[in-house]
Each structure stands twice: as C-alpha cells, then as structure tokens.
C-alpha cells in the first residue's frame, strides 16, 4: 500500500514516464548497493544570442568574470567533490563567476570539445566541432535564486562565446 502511494505521488509530481523511471532507478540502486543506476539527462541545444537577456538597469551590481583555478570564491562552493574544479581546469574547461558584494552569487562551466561526464561514465561531444561548447554545472546561490544572477551569467557567456565564434 505504501509503495502504491509513493508511485502515485511520483507520477503526479514527475509525470508517468519519469515517475516510473525514478522508482525503477531507486529499486535498482538499492538492490545493487549503488552499482546500478538510471540517470536521465535532457540534452538541449541552445543557440548563442547577441540579444541582451536583461534590460541594462537590471543586475548592474552583479559582476561576472572568468575564474582561475586558484580563485578564492570557488572554495566557497557547497556540495562539490574535492578536486573536481582542478580536474575541470586541467581539461580546459572555463568557469564564469557571478559576484555580488564580494560574495559568490553563482557560476557556470563550459568546455570546448569533448566533456567526460563526472556523474556517469560517458563522453559528451558537442557538434559541430569548433562551433559548439558543452555547458554544465550551472549554480546560483540560494539567496540569489529568482534574481538576475542566472540571466547575467548567461548573458556574459553568450557575449564571450559569440566573440570567439561559437
């Protein structure tokens, strides 16, 4: 009876297909001591646009800059595996940081070329080569969610990538 209630709640929340996948994935994970999982990704092709995402008066205090591997603001990021940022920089990935009043407000990562996914063992290859990037791990600090931080990050990414021929 409890299992049916859980299934109904998952289907209502996630939709029929995603609810079943979630339950199947949870059962596989438990039965295999986390050796088997189902991970669903939605891949979206996002065009680079030169049109501003924010009006000029919004997000003026948010500073977006490219991070370096020793950037102190990256040390303040919660819930990331030790050494993951160093690995990303070593593979040529780039990180844009959004800063507000000296604090980390958010970031996004992107890489030109292949991206070895660190959650599942697969290789993502953005195509067409040289004209696409793979973006991942977009983060906005809790207190800045529903603020202009997300759009400010993407606007800065679009401007940089467009200037680089992406």
Image (cartoon, helix red, strand yellow):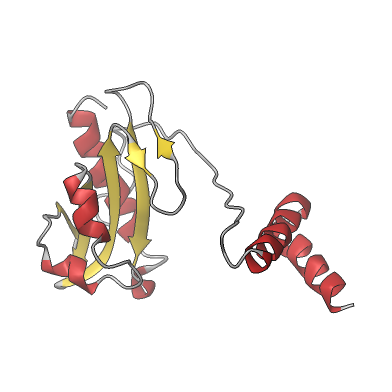
Q: Residue furthest bottom?
A: 2
- Number of labels in the image equals 0
* Residue at 12%, 57% in the rendered image: 69
Q: Nearer the viewer, residue 142 or 77?
A: 77
Q: How far from the left and from the top, in percent, is residue 97?
A: 21, 57
Q: Is residue 140 above or below residue 125?
A: below
> Quadrant of residue 68 in the image?
bottom left
**Image-based side of 75 in relation to 136, left or right:** left
Q: Does the image show residue 24?
A: yes
Q: How far from the left and from the top, in percent, is residue 101?
A: 16, 73
* Residue at 54%, 46% in the rendered image: 41
Q: Does the image show residue 55?
A: no
Q: Residue furthest right?
A: 1
Quadrant where the N terminus sits is bottom right
Q: Is residue 110 above or below residue 83?
A: above
**Image-based side of 95 in relation to 140, left or right:** left
Q: Nearer the viewer, residue 1 or 120?
A: 120
* Residue at 23%, 34% in the rendered image: 161
* Residue at 23%, 63% in the rendered image: 83
Q: How far from the left and from the top, in percent, is residue 103?
A: 19, 73
Q: How far from the left and from the top, in percent, is residue 80?
A: 33, 67
Quadrant where the C terminus sits is top left
Q: Nearer the viewer, residue 143 or 75?
A: 75
**Image-based side of 75 in relation to 79, left or right:** left
């Amino acid at each position: 009876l409890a299992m049916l209630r859980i299934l109904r709640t998952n289907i209502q929340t996630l939709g029929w297909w995603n609810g079943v996948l979630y339950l199947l994935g949870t059962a596989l994970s438990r039965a295999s001591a986390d050796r088997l999982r189902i991970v669903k990704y939605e891949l979206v092709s996002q065009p680079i646009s030169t049109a501003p995402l924010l009006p000029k008066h919004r997000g003026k205090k948010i500073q977006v800059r490219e991070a370096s591997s020793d950037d102190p603001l990256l040390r303040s990021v919660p819930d990331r595996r030790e050494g993951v940022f160093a690995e990303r920089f070593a593979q040529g990935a780039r990180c844009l940081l959004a800063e507000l009043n000296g604090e980390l407000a958010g970031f996004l990562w992107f890489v030109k070329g292949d991206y070895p996914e660190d959650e599942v063992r697969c290789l993502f290859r953005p195509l067409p080569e040289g004209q696409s990037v793979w973006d991942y791990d977009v983060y906005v600090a809790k207190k800045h969610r529903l603020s202009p931080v997300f759009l400010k990050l993407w606007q800065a990414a679009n401007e940089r990538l467009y200037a680089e021929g992406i």
